Amino acid sequence: MPESVQAVCDRILSLDRAVRFAGMANGGKIVASKYRKGLAPLLTEKESELSVVQSTIRMLLRKPLEEKLGGMVYAFARYGNVKRATIPLRDDWTLMVSFDLESEHDSVIMGKIIPLLRENGLYVK
């Protein structure tokens, strides 16, 4: 992997002002993360870990349908305070990204984040 996972999180934060958080997880454990400067996290560290485990389980539950639907590019949820995306990566890695509510998350993910992940050999779809 050309960059460390922490460096990738740092770069994702620099891609767009609407990105609040980027975290990379492996095996349901957050390995690297970064919040936008000056931002108070909405979840505690323990809650973030639980969220990663829940997202990983949901991704595994979707796997059987991928043959008919195509591979998952990302999963998205809009909450009252934040937008969140889960992006499956190679070798059981997962990227979690949160966005401001008013953001155009799809264009940020598809136009900025996915190209960065591909550049680093993390996204292989």
Image (cartoon, rainbow, N blue to C red):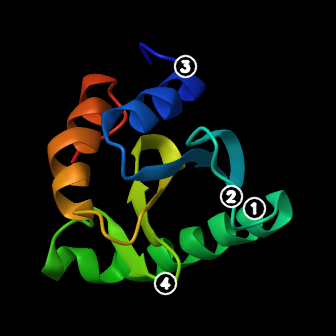
Instruction: Measure the alpha-carbon separation of dots 4 and 2.
Output: 21 Å
Left or right of 67: which side holds 49?
Answer: right
User: Are discs 2 and 1 less than 8 Å apart at CB?
Assistant: yes
Left or right of 29: which side holds 122?
Answer: left
Which residue in the protein does label 3 denote? 4
User: Are discs 2 and 3 less than 8 Å apart at CB?
Assistant: no
Mark 2, Cα crowd under 10 Å, few <14 / some 14-19 / many 20+, is some
Which residue in the protein does label 2 denote? 28
Q: Position of residue 16 (x, y in %)?
A: 31, 41
Can the viewer see residue 109 in this picture?
A: yes
Which residue in the protein does label 4 denote? 79
Q: Amino acid at mark 3?
A: Ser
Mark 4, Cα crowd under 10 Å, few <14 / some 14-19 / many 20+, is few
Identify the residue at horizontal 32%, vertical 35% (top origin).
15
Mark 4 vs mark 2, foreground winner is: 4
Q: Earlier in the sequence, mark 2 or mark 3?
A: 3
Instruction: Measure the alpha-carbon separation of dots 4 and 1.
Output: 18 Å
Which residue in the protein does label 1 denote? 49
Instruction: Measure the alpha-carbon separation of dots 4 and 3.
Output: 30 Å
Looking at the rendering, which quadrant does residue 77 occupy?
A: bottom left
Q: Earlier in the sequence, mark 4 or mark 2?
A: 2
Q: Amino acid at mark 2?
A: Gly
Mark 3, Cα crowd under 10 Å, few <14 / some 14-19 / many 20+, is few
Looking at the rendering, which quadrant does residue 75 occupy?
A: bottom left
